[in-house]
Amino acid sequence: MKKAWSILPDEWKPILKERGMRAFRADQILQALYRDYITDWDQATTLPKDFREQLKTEFPITKTKTLEVSKSSDGTQKLLIGLEDGESVETVLIPATGRFTQCISTQVGCGMGCAFCASGARGVVRSLTADEIVAEYMAGRALGEITNIVVMGMGEPFANYDETMRALKLINAGRGPNLGARHITLSTCGVVPGFAKLAAEGIQFELSVSLHAPNDALRNELMPVNKKWPIDELLAACAAYTKATKRIITFEYTVIKGINDSRECAEELARQVKRVPMAKVNLIPLSPVSHRPDFKTPDERTMLMFLDVLMKNHVQTMLRRSRGKDADAACGQLRLRRIGG
Ligand code: SAH
């Protein structure tokens, strides 16, 4: 048994053939799944009834349930999605002029343990399968046409590389939802083996790297992943990636008051980032998280000072606003939830 939403459009024909099912059915299936966006084979009324029954047992469509919708005053919506085994994940929809961005999760919880992030506060329960990640997208697109996807929800995509990539390839596929690769951004905390793998895919997904500290001493404290892959190794992997793909890398830097917000940090960050050709920096003020009340959001002046230092050092930098804070939907606020206990 294979889940329908885990099968790439081009894989349907051979799969059907292998099972003695007729090849032209593949086109009907793809139309039902990605033109009509059915959520149950019974809705595929162009298919004969006995064929629908066969699809139900051989290639079931993942059943998820939107358990909760939280709305932020800025228009951001967060969906809590219940999975078939009773676990749940959050996905966030962010409207902007001409855009409707979906932030998707790749794991239930997160095993990376970054100090400032609520997603890792209780560890990782399990990775999502490709069809579950596609199911998140399907739940999101029910609220409006998705123009962009950022893989910046719960979980570390490079710690669930294969399933994440399969889901993104499916969403990107021409005969699938057909969302352009350049409209899909992966974000990693620095799981180094993922960079070469992604470069080898030859797909033009965008890549962000969560850096958050300009040296190993500080990064070790904030991000345990740094003990496994320290900054030198991480930046070398980034440089190899930009060299091989000719694609930019965006470094995410969450600014935490009194922790990584000094002028020296900004200067050191500029030096580090410049080791990677075609690098950019996004500065994001920390979103408050309840498990670390000692971590505070920096004031506007600090953000501007930090920005100024980077710009003066000729680093392309953007100041980002966190969206959806009053719905606990902002960066780092997604967390593991147990329904009914
Ligand atoms: N594991 C991946 C995907 C998560 S992306 C990664 O680490 O990149 C989520 C982004 O939000 C990351 O850049 C993360 O470091 C950042 N983030 C986490 N907690 C945050 C917080 N409290 N405030 C602002 N950004 C935060």
Image: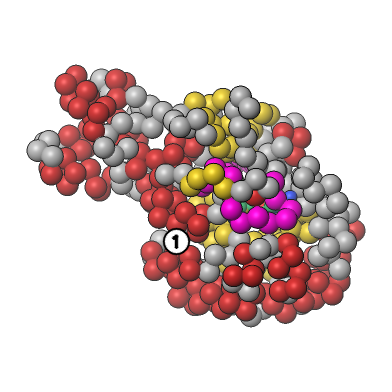
Can residue 282 be seen?
Answer: yes
- Tell me, yes or no, whether the highlighted magenta stretch contains residue 148: no
Q: Residue at x 86, y 68 (%)?
A: 262
Q: Quadrant of the N terminus?
A: top left
Task: Say which of 322 and 31 sits in front.
Answer: 322
| Residue type, numbered disc 1 | Gln
Task: Say which of 193 and 276 sits in front.
Answer: 193
The spot of residue 265 in percent (x, y) is 81, 72
Q: Residue at x 65, y 55 (%)?
A: 113
Task: Say which of 73 and 152 sits in front.
Answer: 152
Task: Say which of 123 and 63 sits in front.
Answer: 123
Which quadrant holds residue 156? bottom right
The spot of residue 24 in percent (x, y) is 14, 37
Q: Secondary structure at mark 1?
A: loop
| Residue holding disc 1 | 204
Q: Residue furthest front?
A: 341
Q: Quadrant of the C terminus?
A: top right
The spot of residue 266 in percent (x, y) is 80, 71
Q: Residue at x 41, y 28 (%)?
A: 63
Chain part drawn in magenta: 95-119
Residue 312 lies left or right of residue 337; in this view the side is right
Q: Residue at x 86, y 55 (%)?
A: 298
Q: How many marks?
A: 1
